[in-house]
Amino acid sequence: MRVLTTTMCYPTPKEPERGIFIQRRALAIAGLGHHVEVVSPQPWCPLLRANSTCPDQCEPLPATFPRMFSIPIVGWATDGFAYARALEQAIRKANPRGTPGLDLIDAHFEYPDGVGAALAAGRLGLPVVVTVRGKIVSLSKRAGRRAQIRAMLRNVDAIVAVSESLARCVRHVAGDDLQVDVIPNGIDTSTFRPLDRAECRQSLGWDPHAGYILSVGHLQRLKGFDRLVAVWSQVRAACGDVRLVLAGSRRGESDFASRLLADIERANRDSALRSSPPAVEFVGPQPPDRLNLMYNAADLVASTSRSEGWCNAIAESLAVGTPVVATDVGGNREQIHSSDLGTLVPDGDADVLTTALIQAIRRDWNRPLIASVGLRRTWEHAAREVESVFKRVISARHSSINCSARARSFAATEAAEAPGSSFGFRPSSFSGPSQEGAGRRSGVPG
């Protein structure tokens, strides 16, 4: 099987952590014996967006990063078409002599990635599968963009959602009759695994006598770092020397990042938080191996997001055996499905969050039990489930093509043998199943 994975959110030399979960799934699919290549269009606009040229990659997967013309502010309405153009041109450039040697396009995220991939796939005559992730919640708030996302969801060959919560969101946006395959992300068990806690703290230079709560995510309001900073004085007042470590990329919302960093500085000047090193610290992006040390060294991981699809930080924390306190949003309840794994708190309730953090830091958790649950789902498990969807889509497409060919042949024979026939057979009447939701309606066999 020859698969082209496409998304704007894919690791680059400058941002190796960006979209690493997409890369891991693509690698796992390639590990099943399939050829996988990547096209990751990068937004660009003369004078308004910096030149985002990124060199092609050969490892770990062949990847190209074509420029995608995107005008700031108005791009929410036009980026789907720009993405389609960039993707189609990249595919045709790689196959200048004719039909691309691909079996399927594997798109991630809804807009502009999914919308653009669906448009390009239609022009190229290729099936397309779109994996829906947490951004659909915010992306579908604008009416114009929501209409594009809805049309895409109703016309692609298959939809994958990384949580049941997102599957419900897909049906809310595009119709209750849609079939959605729920395939959560996996875990890279070669990276995220239980290690000796004391040794991890020593490697990181963490105080062996202090408490540590870790939170991992982008420096964006959506991820809720500000909620933890706001309650930290109360947590320390109740628990003593407990330190908050925030890790993640700086990309995203510069205004929010500036406010959060100022809040952290003010919090550390507060007499209740004075310690060395600081009681609250943002350490920026971390490579996966170091993140594994941090997950293992922490007493607790906190995820206070305002919205989630399938939280990779929760999955990684559970894989090493570290409990989690998380807001009850998106797929978090599907991940923290037992009180033995952590605690869910209502979204936006600062008092309940504070109490949950204090109780969790004081509790004696069964970390081996947590790890045994967290390590169950690997990327190979996820890849095999995705592979099944891909095979179903390709089989359905081939059946549709064969059906159309037989229908056209039959109609031509009828026309030749009985030119005056009033049956009204026309080749165009036998074009196979409609592309709108072909094979995706609830109850339609796959």
Image (tube, rainbow, N blue to C red):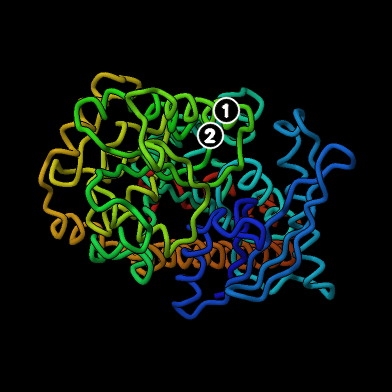
Residue 67: % across, % down: 79, 53
Circle nearer the N terminus (1, 2): 2
Q: Tell me if mark 2 has few (under 14), some (14-19) or many (20+) residues whose alpha carbon lies within 10 angstroms of its own.
A: many
Hey, what amino acid is under mark 1?
Phe
Q: Quadrant of residue 49?
A: top right
Hey, what amino acid is under mark 2?
Gln
Location of residue 332 with respect to 269 vertically, above or below = below
Residue 107: % across, % down: 58, 54
Q: Are marks 1 and 2 in contact (CB under 8 Å)?
A: yes
Q: Residue at x 48, y 24 (%)?
A: 266
| Residue 69 vs residue 216, the one in the foreground | 216
Location of residue 32 with respect to 400 vertically, above or below = below
Q: Residue at x 60, y 73 (%)?
A: 61
Q: Quadrant of the C terminus?
A: bottom left
Q: Residue at the right extreme?
A: 46
Q: Which residue is mark 1?
A: 256
In the visual, does 105 lie left or right of 274? right
Task: Say which element carries label 1.
Answer: helix
Residue 436: % across, % down: 57, 44
Residue 19: % across, % down: 54, 54
Q: CA distance from mark 1 to mark 2?
A: 6 Å
Location of residue 287 with respect to 210 vertically, above or below = below
Location of residue 440 with respect to 103 vertically, above or below = above
Q: Which residue is mark 2?
A: 220
Q: Residue at x 68, y 56 (%)?
A: 121
| Residue 397 vs residue 241, the one in the foreground | 241
Q: How many marks?
A: 2
Q: Quadrant of the N terminus?
A: bottom right
Q: Residue at x 45, y 64 (%)?
A: 392
| Residue 5 vs residue 313, the one in the foreground | 313
Task: Say which element carries label 2.
Answer: loop
